Image: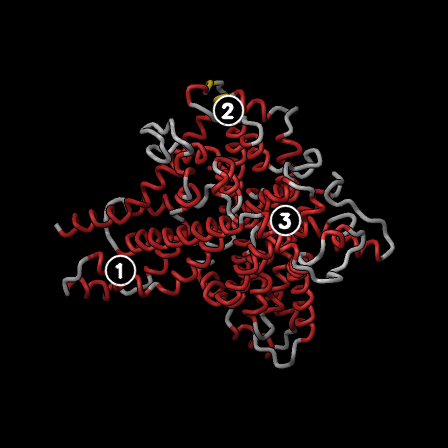
């Protein structure tokens, strides 16, 4: 009797959560999978037309812009932002660990992470402005010609990546700092007694012991980068010029909500989702071998 | 590592980096005080030649700031309260009660965190707009004027549960001694009372972390709010209202105005964050890796 009461209680407490996931997660995923096999403008359900694999064939065909440049850009964006934010965060978290007022410094680096992307995107747009922006102010001040960062297809993607990498530093610093704190002080003390210098200690103690944290940061921020599109939306609206900054989730968003191709957009969402899922599983495997059991 | 000498190089690197992190914010604040003509001039300068407050006056006139603020605040407060409630209830159940299906539900909640947000914009947009019996819709979700998006519910309901929140609460509540709960049960306390008066107060530190996290995230969330605004313009939040202002008018004229709007939208949250960062940063650092 006691056990059945506990079961009833548990499911009563869980019912709002389970109902929510049914309506806003399970049904949507199935619905979205169904839409991806139809031709639909998102209006009434009767106007849905079953087209089988047509949408998938279309976006995966060599002529489509989805594989290239859109998915290529998605990977470049994820790679670039992770490279910038991870390398910076590794250095920053190490140097902060040697200072006083660590909380203050970490907060400063974290400020972009608690700011709306609309602000981040617009401020970087202003800094990139070819006529009155800060960065071109410095470039022309040094005697070079000003660069049209976001209107030039050769520079646009890199310009968005730099902003995105800058934005990601703070959260990586937070996680890496937590990892650094978990390394016992006496390891360093013992190394100092043996005469190891700071550089030697970092390479022989810090990096090996930090490896699970490093893998965690790399993988979560890479997956985050593959999904990200808000910054690109704010800075370039539609992934322009041309498709030079366009990424998968943004193309999906515009196909659905700018052009009303809900079928194509849903197919794109699933292709991107499956790609991310495969990458996640591969990385989980690397994780396990890299010594993170609990992830 | 306790440094004996002052680590000058570390200070130099971190200070330089901090300048790079904070500078864009300074640029935003200072340019919000530039006049449109100074802004349109060809040379960059950080400081305005003369500080003008016109942009703020204009921002208050042209943006429906009262509405934007109300929507942003109502949304963030509601989502935060709902997530705290659902996360602590589910977290408690998954940490302390024994029942069939527990492992399955916990695995499911972990799995929900692997689904990327972009997968849900399309179906959830349709579901929200065609929500049965909401906003004048009939039982089949037809006939109404926007379903949940007829009111602020459209901004709130799809964010009412957070897999991360449930996970965070479960991990924390697992650390509470079973003996407390057993003792209360033996004393005859009802289950809801055990949860509300015994467990919940003990979770205060992690609730604070989760509250700050959810409030900031929902205050800043942009894409869903933009979609809801496309159904019903009365649902614009601060980020949406400011971004829309930008796309409507001549960009060179409105840029300082946009900056003023962004200062209004971000600076209160940033200041609140700096005040509360201890709860947030410590909570995140303790929970980030477990």
Residue B258 visible somewhere in the drawing = yes
Q: Does B140 sit left or right of B248 as displayed?
A: left
Q: Chain of mark 3?
A: A
Which residue is at the far right? A143
Rounded to the nearest whole Å, what is the CA distance between mark 2 and mark 3?
Answer: 30 Å
Disc ID at residue B196: 1
Location of residue B6 (image quadrant): bottom right
Foreground tag (1 vs 2): 2
Label 1 neighbour load within 10 Å: few <14, some 14-19, many 20+: few
Q: Residue A120: where, in percent of width, then height?
A: 62, 52
Label 3 neighbour load within 10 Å: few <14, some 14-19, many 20+: many
Q: Are marks 3 and 1 in contact (CB under 8 Å)?
A: no
Q: Chain of mark 2?
A: A
Q: Residue B244: where, in percent of width, then height?
A: 59, 42
Please name the residue shown 44% across and 36% down the image: B124
Give the mark, 2 or 3, whose residue is nearer the N terminus: 2
For the residues tagged 1 and 2, is the chain the same?
no
């Amino acid at each position: 009797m006691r056990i059945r009461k506990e079961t009833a209680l548990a499911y009563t407490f869980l019912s709002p959560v389970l109902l929510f996931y049914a309506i806003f997660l399970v049904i949507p995923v199935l619905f979205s999978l169904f839409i991806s096999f139809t031709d639909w403008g998102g209006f009434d359900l009767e106007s849905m037309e079953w087209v089988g694999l047509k949408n998938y064939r279309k976006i995966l065909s060599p002529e489509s812009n989805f594989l290239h440049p859109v998915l290529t850009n998605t990977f470049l964006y994820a790679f670039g932002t992770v490279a910038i934010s991870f390398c910076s965060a590794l250095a920053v978290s190490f140097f902060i660990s040697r200072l006083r007022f660590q909380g203050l410094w970490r907060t400063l680096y974290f400020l972009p992470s608690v700011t709306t992307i609309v602000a981040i995107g617009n401020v970087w747009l202003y800094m990139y402005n070819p006529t009155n922006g800060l960065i071109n102010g410095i470039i022309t001040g040094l005697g070079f010609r000003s660069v049209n960062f976001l209107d030039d297809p050769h520079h646009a993607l890199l310009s968005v990546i730099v902003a995105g990498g800058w934005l990601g530093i703070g959260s990586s610093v937070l996680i890496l700092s937590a990892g650094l704190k978990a390394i016992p002080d006496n390891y360093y003390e013992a190394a100092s007694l043996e005469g190891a210098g700071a550089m030697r200690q970092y390479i022989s103690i810090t990096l090996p012991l930090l490896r699970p944290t490093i893998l965690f940061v790399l993988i979560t921020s890479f997956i985050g980068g593959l999904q990200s599109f808000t910054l690109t939306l704010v800075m370039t609206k539609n992934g322009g010029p041309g498709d030079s900054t366009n990424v998968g989730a943004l193309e999906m968003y515009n196909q659905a909500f700018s052009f009303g191709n809900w079928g194509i957009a849903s197919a794109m969402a699933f292709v991107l989702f499956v790609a991310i899922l495969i990458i996640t599983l591969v990385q989980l495997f690397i994780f396990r071998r890299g010594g993170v059991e609990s992830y | 590592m306790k440094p004996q000498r002052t680590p000058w190089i570390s200070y130099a690197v971190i200070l330089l980096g901090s300048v790079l992190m904070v500078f864009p914010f300074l640029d935003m604040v200072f340019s919000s005080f530039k006049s449109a003509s100074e802004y349109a001039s060809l040379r960059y300068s950080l400081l305005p030649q003369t500080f003008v407050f016109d942009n703020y006056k204009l921002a208050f006139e042209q943006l429906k700031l009262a509405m934007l603020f109300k929507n942003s605040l109502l949304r963030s407060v509601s989502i935060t309260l709902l997530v705290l409630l659902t996360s602590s209830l589910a977290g408690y159940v998954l940490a302390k009660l024994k029942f069939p299906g527990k492992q399955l539900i916990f695995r499911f909640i972990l799995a929900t965190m692997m689904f990327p947000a972009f997968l849900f914009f399309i179906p959830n947009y349709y579901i929200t707009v065609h929500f049965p019996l909401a906003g004048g819709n009939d039982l089949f979700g037809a006939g109404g004027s926007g379903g949940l998006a007829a009111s602020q519910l459209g901004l709130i309901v799809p964010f009412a549960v957070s897999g991360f929140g449930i996970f965070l609460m479960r991990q924390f509540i697992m650390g509470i001694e079973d003996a407390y709960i057993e003792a209360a049960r033996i004393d005859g306390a009802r289950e809801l009372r055990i949860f509300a008066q015994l467990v919940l107060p003990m979770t205060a530190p992690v609730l604070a972390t989760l509250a700050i996290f959810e409030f900031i995230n929902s205050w800043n969330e942009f894409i869903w709010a933009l979609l809801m605004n496309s159904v019903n313009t009365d649902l614009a939040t601060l980020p949406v209202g400011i971004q829309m202002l930008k796309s409507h008018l001549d960009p060179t004229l409105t840029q300082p105005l946009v900056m003023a709007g962004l200062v209004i939208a971000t600076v209160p949250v940033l200041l609140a964050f700096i005040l509360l960062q201890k709860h947030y940063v410590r909570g995140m650092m303790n929970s980030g890796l477990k």
